[in-house]
Amino acid sequence: SQQGEEDPQALSIQEGENATMNCSYKTSINNLQWYRQNSGRGLVHLILIRSNEREKHSGRLRVTLDTSKKSSSLLITASRAADTASYFCATALSSSGNTPLVFGKGTRLSVIA
Amino acid sequence: AAGVIQSPRHLIKEKRETATLKCYPIPRHDTVYWYQQGPGQDPQFLISFYEKMQSDKGSIPDRFSAQQFSDYHSELNMSSLELGDSALYFCASSLGGLETQYFGPGTRLLVL
């Protein structure tokens, strides 16, 4: 019943490589957000992309959104050991600022130094 | 910058006991959300408040209740605790009309 499904579930790469994580969702959305979670810690907001946007950049992060395929991808370039964390996509169903987020299952990224 | 504060950070309870989790949103934020994250799971929305009124309700058990007070802090009250309630409980806040939610560090609840 989850709105978002992410793949891969786990990803292990060498430092300096790029990491790509994908997220698919089921219903129409207003925006999609990506969060990072270090083991057992809080969720840190990374980037928000609206339904009328195709691509967005923030530092080493690049997010794409394909509303026709109901999917999004998060690319982390030149990964660092500190990028090791779980990454979740989350969707907001309406344009209201008070809308709860529906999270995907998450991708566990391990960056090996 | 001030962040979302949650207390306590860790809590151990016995089955059938009660627990109260507290959340202090970022100053001027008027919306508070509660999420539950089981071990190895994604966060699940429980309940939210906007301007001290319940805004949305998710998968919150009837044994749980919550409210937002006049100073905008929120409390999640959990009664008749079960083993399955062991989880990380996150509070998030946002400024009404803006979509970004800022999460607190979470309260780790262990029910024995």
Image (tube, coloured by chain):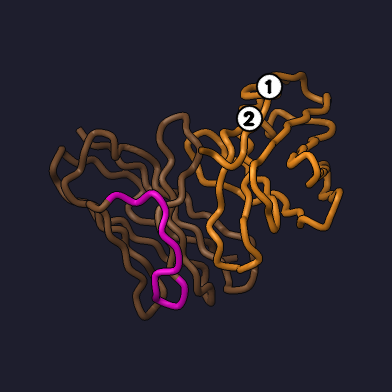
Stretch in magenta = B50-61
Q: Identify the residue at horizontal 84%, vertical 55% (top origin).
A: A53
State the quadrant of the C terminus of chain B. top left
| Residue A28 falls inside the magenta stretch | no
State the quadrant of the N terminus of chain B. bottom right
Q: Secondary structure at mark 2?
A: strand
Which residue bears the numbered disc 2?
Answer: A107
Q: B26 or A23: which is nearer to us?
A: A23
Q: Amino acid at mark 1?
A: Leu
Q: Secondary structure at mark 1?
A: strand
Give the percent coordinates (x, y) of residue B46: 40, 53
Q: Identify the residue at horizontal 56%, vertical 34% (top origin).
A: A105
Chain A pictured colour: orange
Q: Is residue B16 left or right of residue B10?
A: left
Q: Residues within 10 Å of mark 2 (few under 14, many from 20)?
A: many
Give the percent coordinates (x, y) of residue B71: 39, 78
Q: Amino acid at mark 2?
A: Thr
Give the percent coordinates (x, y) of residue B59: 38, 49
| Circles 2 and 1 in contact, beta carbons < 8 Å | yes
Q: CA distance from mark 2 to mark 1?
A: 7 Å
Residue B30, above or below B86: below
Q: Identify the residue at horizontal 62%, vertical 47% (top origin).
A: A90
